[in-house]
Image (tube, grey):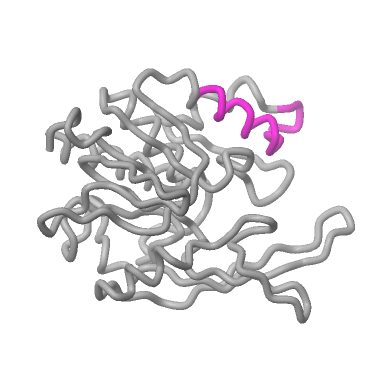
Amino acid sequence: MDAQASGFDAVVVGAGITGCEAAWRSARAGLRVLLVTTSLDTSYNLARDAERLRPPERSLMAEVVPGLSGEDGTVRNFALHRAVKQALEFEPGLHTLQSTVSGLLVDGGRVAGVRTWEGIDRKAGATALCVGSFLRARLHIGDVVEQQGRLSEMAYDDLYLELEQRGFRFVDVRFTAPAVAGSLPYEVSTRAFEAEEFPAPAHASWRLPGLFAAGACVSSTGKEPPGYEAAVRQGMALADSLVEAAG
């Protein structure tokens, strides 16, 4: 699809590790990429305040981590987020946008971008969902239940309902966050695509052309243990598929 007619070569929804890696690598390969997320302030977030990371070669993580490691070999979450955000903003061909995706644009049976809650359509030749734990997510803290995929971040309920209506199959998933520095522990119950909906390594939908998905929003096949490095590799593989789809 012509990039000028569609707006972008690819739109990546979600700025977790997988989404950021996919957007950055795609832009490095020459694509015009839109990375859209509900919160740019939590892009590339780690589960804890500091982690030891083993960046895969030629990844965005490998680009920024060497200058961030402390004496104990750990990387602080905020320092990593700040470095990644700067790298994304300085990458030619990559545009970051804080917005809420509410559905898909479909033209002639093919995905042609996304609709947003704000009412502005974002057109692209390919659309990649890297929405992590946010599809019909519910956050549980004790007896309190919120429509969130992470503390203070709203879930993609409208997007999930559309995908369900289009016949996509899902499984129930739960993520647990322990108490940190006196905060209460919480749990997120969400939905993830069945692995067969977006088979690796291409991560392309057989059900709806032009649509891709990777990361925690796709259930694991068990071939690789979950973790930061796995998320990076999935983002890199997704980027290669987006580049190939762009021709």
Quadrant in the picture for the N terminus = top left
- Residue drawn at (48%, 18%) of the image: 90
Instruction: Give x and y (percent) for residue 120.
Output: 39, 45
**In the picture provided, is 134 more to the left or to the right than 197?**
right
- Which residue is depicted at the point 46% across and 59% down? 216
Whole-percent x and y of residue 225? 46, 59
Count of marks, rendered view: 0
Query: In this rendering, is residue 194 above or below 68?
Result: below
Which segment is the magenta one?
A: 70-87
Residue 28 percent coordinates (x, y): 33, 23
Task: Determine whether 207 is above or below 56 in the image.
Answer: below
Q: Is residue 8 magenta?
A: no
Farthest residue in the front direction? 119
In the image, is residue 71 part of the stretch drawn in magenta? yes
Quadrant for the C terminus in the image: top left
Residue at the extreme bottom = 143
Closest to the observer: 83 or 152? 152
* Viewer-side residue, 117 vs 84: 117
Q: Position of residue 111 (x, y in %)?
A: 21, 53
